[in-house]
Image: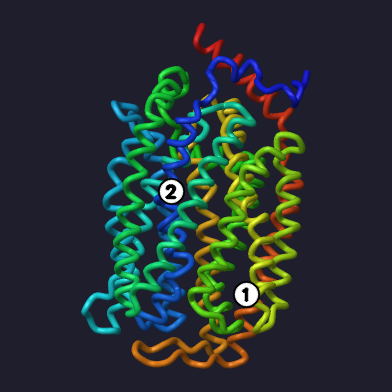
């Protein structure tokens, strides 16, 4: 018999006390550092590589593509290894975060250094640093993400938990943009701007990781101690992959996430070119536009979280995507001089961007519960890894194609010490298409996939009820 969807708890979740505010805050802080680094890379790395380091747009796009492809490849590897890591003193997730935090910060800093080497070797330097950074980023972020289903099994509490996570995530994004704006106003020399920005951001990114481990350690240890499946021998990787990709709801969540984040990342990567080359606005105004998007998204996280309790995650996703598509259409139609409308589009886009953060990540723990019911094992690491694997491959190809399209359209890279070049009409049109119609296409596909996603709140409570009975049977055997 289906459970009442309005019931705040099911039998499966009542055995564990609700998460404390401190645990939610500590967990949320774990996404602060990775958000700072990811945001600065999305908004500034392409511009830095072309207009400061001096790579042409095609090579700069290739640097980003290679890094993201490796990021996708290492996700299932690290996810699989974290699932197999012995619990030990620090747990199978926390030990990864502790060990990788400092190398993660150092490799991020090196992204913004221009070494004194021949220009022809710069491409290979940035490829190498990108490979290192994406390895340590995954080693921190993937085990962190896999903590979500270990902290709580409650359907609505997971949405609340992710509200805290992405509030810190967007807060880190906003803070990184504010830091960049201050440094760019104080420091006028471009090379110095970016190396100082990279150094400060690296330090700020490492410290919250340790705070997250400290604040969530006890709750995770309790989960690892009482979950029967945690002591079983893991299935072979090939078998795990087959089970992961036979989980139909998981495939929908992965597609939703892929489409949402392609729209986010492509838009973010193109905004500096759109603002500077098409709208002829200053770099300071570009940062303010990005802040308008991120600030709105952070506020709306908690609004959407409350709304989802009443109408469900899928309906919230539909509403957010509809508003976002309106904003993308507005960006394509904007003309130079329409400064006010730029900010209107940015605020409307923020309503939608927040659902791209919140909804897919609150769906994936429900999918993991279904997998445990079917397989008898907890495989958070593998699921979180493959959730982002195709997303990162798609993103890598998307950024590569954007870079190649700009190159093909005749985009002119800057040369250090010389004025910014005037872009040809073909390059300007390519920028407008890539920032408007292209993301809209992905958003439409995401809406279709969300419509087909089968796990509602009532279905999830039935899964938890069966899972609870199965665990009790295993414990009593």
Name the element at disc 1.
helix
Of mark 1 and mark 2, the one earlier in the sequence is 2
The total number of labels drawn is 2
Viewer-closest of 414 and 343: 343
Structural distance between the alpha carbons of marks 1 and 2: 29 Å
| Residue 94, quarter of the rendered image | top left
Q: Is residue 379 above or below residue 274?
A: above
Q: Residue drawn 73% across and 53% down?
A: 447
Q: Residues within 10 Å of mark 1 (few under 14, many from 20)?
A: many
| Residue 391, quarter of the rendered image | bottom right
Q: Is residue 68 visible?
A: no
Q: Is residue 229 visible?
A: yes
Residue 32 badge: 2
Name the element at disc 2.
helix
x and y percentages locating residue 385 in the rendered image: 48, 46
Q: Is residue 42 above or below residue 372?
A: below
x and y percentages locating residue 307 in the rendered image: 72, 40
Residue 109 in the figure: left or right of residue 297: left
x and y percentages locating residue 455 in the rendered image: 70, 35
């Amino acid at each position: 018999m289906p459970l009442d969807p309005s019931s705040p708890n099911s039998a499966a979740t009542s055995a564990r006390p609700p998460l404390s505010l401190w645990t939610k805050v500590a967990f949320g802080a774990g996404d602060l550092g990775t958000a700072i680094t990811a945001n600065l890379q999305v908004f500034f790395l392409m511009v830095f590589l072309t207009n400061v380091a001096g790579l042409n747009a095609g090579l700069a796009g290739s640097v980003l593509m290679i890094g993201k492809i490796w990021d996708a490849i290492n996700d299932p590897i690290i996810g699989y290894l974290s699932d197999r890591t012995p619990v030990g003193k620090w747990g199978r997730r926390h030990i990864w975060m502790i060990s990788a935090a400092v190398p993660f910060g150092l490799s991020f800093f090196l992204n913004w250094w221009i070494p004194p080497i021949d220009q022809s070797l710069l491409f290979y330097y940035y490829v190498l640093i990108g490979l290192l950074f994406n390895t340590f980023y995954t080693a921190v972020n993937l085990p962190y993400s896999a903590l979500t289903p270990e902290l709580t099994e409650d359907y609505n509490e997971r949405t609340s938990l992710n509200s805290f996570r992405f509030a810190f995530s967007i807060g880190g994004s906003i803070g990184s943009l504010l830091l960049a704006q201050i440094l760019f106003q104080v420091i006028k020399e471009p090379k110095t701007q970016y190396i100082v920005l990279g150094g400060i951001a690296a330090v700020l990114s490492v410290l919250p990781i340790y705070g997250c481990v400290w604040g969530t350690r006890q709750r995770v240890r309790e989960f690892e101690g009482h979950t029967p499946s945690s002591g079983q021998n893991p299935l072979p990787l090939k078998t795990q992959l087959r089970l992961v990709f036979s989980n139909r709801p998981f495939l929908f969540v992965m597609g939703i996430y892929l489409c949402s984040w392609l729209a986010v990342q492509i838009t973010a990567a193109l905004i500096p070119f759109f603002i500077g080359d098409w709208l002829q606005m200053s770099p300071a105004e570009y940062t303010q536009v990005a802040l308008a998007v991120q600030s709105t998204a952070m506020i709306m996280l908690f609004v959407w979280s409350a709304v989802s309790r009443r109408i469900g995650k899928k309906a919230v996703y539909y509403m957010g995507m509809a508003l976002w598509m309106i904003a993308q259409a507005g960006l394509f139609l904007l003309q130079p001089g329409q400064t006010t409308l730029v900010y209107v589009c940015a605020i409307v886009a923020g309503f939608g961007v927040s659902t791209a953060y919140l909804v897919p990540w609150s769906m994936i723990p429900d999918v993991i519960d279904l997998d445990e019911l079917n397989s008898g094992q907890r495989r958070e690491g593998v699921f979180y890894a493959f959730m982002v694997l195709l997303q990162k491959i798609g993103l890598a190809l998307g950024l590569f194609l954007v870079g190649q399209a700009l190159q093909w359209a005749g985009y002119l890279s800057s040369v250090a010490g010389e004025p910014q070049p005037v872009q040809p009409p073909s390059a300007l049109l390519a920028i407008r298409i890539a920032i408007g119609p292209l993301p809209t296409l992905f958003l439409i596909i995401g809406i279709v996939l969300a419509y087909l996603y089968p796990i509602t709140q009532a279905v999830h409570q039935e899964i938890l009820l069966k899972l609870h009975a199965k665990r009790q049977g295993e414990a009593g055997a």
